[in-house]
Image (tube, rainbow, N blue to C red):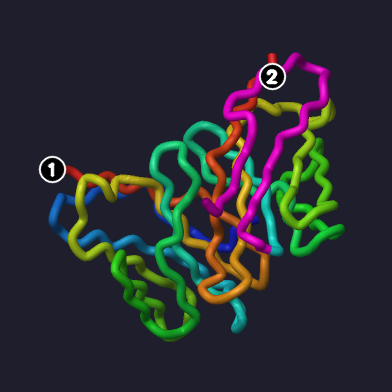
Amino acid sequence: DAKTTQPPSMDCAEGRAANLPCNHSTISGNEYVYWYRQIHSQGPQYIIHGLKNNETNEMASLIITEDRKSSTLILPHATLRDTAVYYCIVRVWSDMRFGAGTRLTVKP
Amino acid sequence: DGGITQSPKYLFRKEGQNVTLSCEQNLNHDAMYWYRQDPGQGLRLIYYSQIVNDFQKGDIAEGYSVSREKKESFPLTVTSAQKNPTAFYLCASLTGTDPYEQYFGPGTRLTVT
């Protein structure tokens, strides 16, 4: 079973920051936090990952709490094209299990 | 072009028949995966393989079987024992270096009647 808990849905206004939370309270020291998103019925797309430190790339920022029990994915300026299902995953070695994800709807 | 191919895109079968879904990758990735997705739901792991001739069950392996005879190929057989086989099936592979990113195929939509 997935080791993460996410809200089933969230809304965000276009141009505003979208903050998507994830709880992974049973995470182990060697497990990474990954975020993917799925648009329509395409395969999920990698966004970002981290172990302990906060991370940023051209798509998003990942904030991981000091105790590593939760994280937040930040889309700094959400656009309509960011409407998708966002999955938070805890990875250990090759084991990649997705949960139900958060359906983010960006509204004009 | 490097990537993952799944065929066919749509597949129709009668109840009681086994059916095999194809997944091929030319990315030279060691690890490959099969996921199932039902309407409005997330992805559920069926099987994954870290290396040729080795595979592990995921959360919903019952009624499915896989083989990994070649690095490039990871076919999934949906057997007649699978009670509700109608679903969208996604195959993926994993890069062997950081960021250990998964790449997904376009999926096969299986309908069993």
Residue type at the position of mark 1: Pro
Q: CA separation, marks 2 and 1?
A: 40 Å
Q: Residue at x 52, y 45 (%)?
A: B42
Above-or-below relation of A79 to A18: above
Q: Residue at x 66, y 62 (%)?
A: B28
Q: Could you tell me residue B70's position as x and y percent?
A: 80, 54
The reply to whether the magenta stretch includes residue A78 is no
- Asked whether A48 or B3 is in front, the reply is B3
Q: Label 1: which residue?
A: A108
Q: How many marks?
A: 2
| Chain label for disc 2 | B
Residue type at the position of mark 2: Val
Q: Which mark is residue B112?
A: 2
> In screen coordinates, is B104 left or right of B50?
left
Q: Could you tell me residue B32's position as x and y percent?
A: 68, 56
| Same-chain check, marks 2 and 1 | no
> In screen coordinates, is A65 left or right of B2?
left
